[in-house]
Amino acid sequence: MKLAFIGLGYVGLTTAVCMAYRGFDVVGVEVDDEKVEKISRGIAPVKEPKLEKLLKYALSRKKFTASTSYRDAVKADVFFITVGTPSKPDGGIDLSRVAEACKHIGETLATQEKVATVAVKSTVVPGTTRTLVKQKLEEASQKKVGMDLNLCVNPEFLREGAAVDDTFHPDRIVIGDDWGRGGKILTRLYKKFYGRKTPPTMITNTVNAEMIKYASNVFLAARISLINEVANICQRTPGADVEEVAKGVGMDRRIGPHFLRAGLGYGGSCFPKDVKALAAFAKGLGVEPFMLESVQKVNDNQPYKAIELAGRLVGNLHGRKAAVLGLSFKPNTDDIREAVSLKIINKLLEHGCTVVAYDPAATENVRRLLGNKINYAESAEECIKNADFCIVATEWDEFRRLKPELFKKHMKKPVVIDGRRVYDPAAISEKAVYAAIGLGPNKT
Ligand code: UGA
C-alpha cells in the first residue's frame, strides 16, 4: 500500500516516518519548500524524540520522500490529510488549509482510474468531513465519494514530545466512515502496521469520530483546570498539598492518576485551540458552553499564580531581577505556542522586573519573539545568578536535577517559585525560601 501525507507538521511527519519505518512506501507533501529541503536531508524541523533517527532510516531505505508537489503522491492508495487547523479570532477554526489540500488531492485523483482513500487526520469540527471535505474532493476529482472515491476520518491522539512512542503504542484507533469502504481499508492498513499488537479499534460515523477528538482534548484540559482549581484552594489552606491530594484522588479507578498534575496551566497548539473551537461550535448551535468557558477561565488565570506567589515572597516586584526556568509549553519540545512562560514574562515586565530566561531547547524561538526585552542564559546556573527570585515554568528533567544548594549559592536571595512541582518541598526549604502551586501556607 502506498501512502501520502499532506502536511508535514509534527503529526504528519511523525506518522509518515513511522509508517515508512515499518515498510510502507510513503510520500509527504508540504507547501513549505524550506521544510521539505530540510526533511529530505534527514533533518526534522520539529524537535521530537526519536523522529530524526527514524527519518534518516526511512530516507536511506527509500521508503519516504518529501516533496512540494502533489504529482509525487499520484500513486498513493491512501491520502492522509494532516494540515493545521489554526484558530480564527472568534475561537472557531480556519479550514482553508484543509479545503486547499482537498482541492489538490482531488485534482491529483482526477488523473487516476483507481479508487483511492482519503483520511482526515486534521482536527476538524463535527460535520466538516461529510460537508466541506466531501464537496471539495468531489468537485476537484469529478469522482463520487462512496463510489469511486473513499473518505473517512481518523483522528490522532499524539502528544508533542512523545509523538513517536504514541504512534507505535496508541491506546486506541478511531475511524469514522459514512460510506463503508474507507474504514475497512484503514483497518487493514493498521493491522499491517501493528500486527498482533493492533490496539482496540472503534469504527463509527465521521461526525462521532470528529467529536471524539474534541471531546478527548476538552476532557483532558478540564481535568487540568479542575486539579488547578483544587491546587489554588490548597494553596490557601494551611497543611494542604495538591500533590498528595491528586495522588489520593487518582487512586480511585473511576478517576485514574493521569492528567492530574497541577501547575501553571496547559499550553501548546492543541488544548487551548480545541477548547475554544468546541465552545465556538457549541455557541453556533445555541448551546451555552458553561464548562468549556470555565476550563478556559481557570487556565487563562493560572500562569499569574506564579506572579502572586512571587509577590507574597518578595514584596514589591518593581526593579527585581527575575529568573525564569523553562520556556517551552512542556518538556522535550522547543514549541512555545501558548506557552505559559510568555504570559509570565510579559507580566513580570509590566511589573518592572528585569527578566533572565533559560530553556534547554526553546530559547531561540523566544528570542525571535521577544528580542532584547529580556536576557537569555545559556544554562540554569547562569539564569539564576544574582536573581531576586526564580520561577520554574516548565518541568524539564534538567531542572528537577538542580541541587537546592545551587539556588543558595548563586541567587541574590534564594527564592524559588515552583510552578510545576519539580522539587521536594522539605529538601529545598532547607536551602531556599520556597513556594509552590497547590502547597498550603504553613508548608512554605
Ligand atoms: C495533547 C493531547 O494530550 C494529545 O492526545 C493530542 O493528540 C494533542 O493534544 C493534539 O490534539 O494534537 P500535547 O498538547 O502535545 O497533546 O501535550 P500534553 O502532554 O497533552 O500537554 C498539554 C499541556 O497540558 C501542557 O502544557 C502540559 O504541561 C499540560 N499538562 C498536562 C498539565 O498541566 N497537567 C497535566 O497533568 C498534564
Image (cartoon, rainbow, N blue to C red):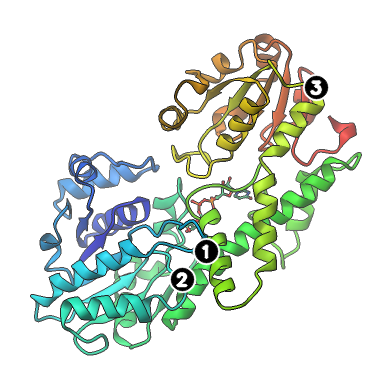
Mark 3: amino acid: Gly
Asked whether disc 3 touches disc 2, contact meaning CB atoms under 8 Å apart, the reply is no
Q: Residue at x 40, y 60 (%)?
A: 85
Residue position marked by numbered label 1 in the rendering: 277
Mark 3 to mark 1: distance in Å? 39 Å
Mark 3 vs mark 2: which is more N-terminal? 2
Element assignment for label 3: loop
Residue 200 in view (yes/no): no
Residue position marked by numbered label 2 in the rendering: 125
The disc placed on residue 315 is: 3
Is the residue at mark 2 in contact range of ligand 1, meaning its CB lies under 8 Å from it? no
Q: Quadrant of the N terminus?
A: bottom left
Q: Residue at x 69, y 45 (%)?
A: 301
Mark 3 to mark 2: distance in Å? 46 Å
Mark 1 vs mark 2: which is more N-terminal? 2
Residue 435 in view (yes/no): yes
Residue 256 x %, y %: 68, 61
Q: Quadrant of the C terminus?
A: top right
Residue 226 x %, y %: 72, 56
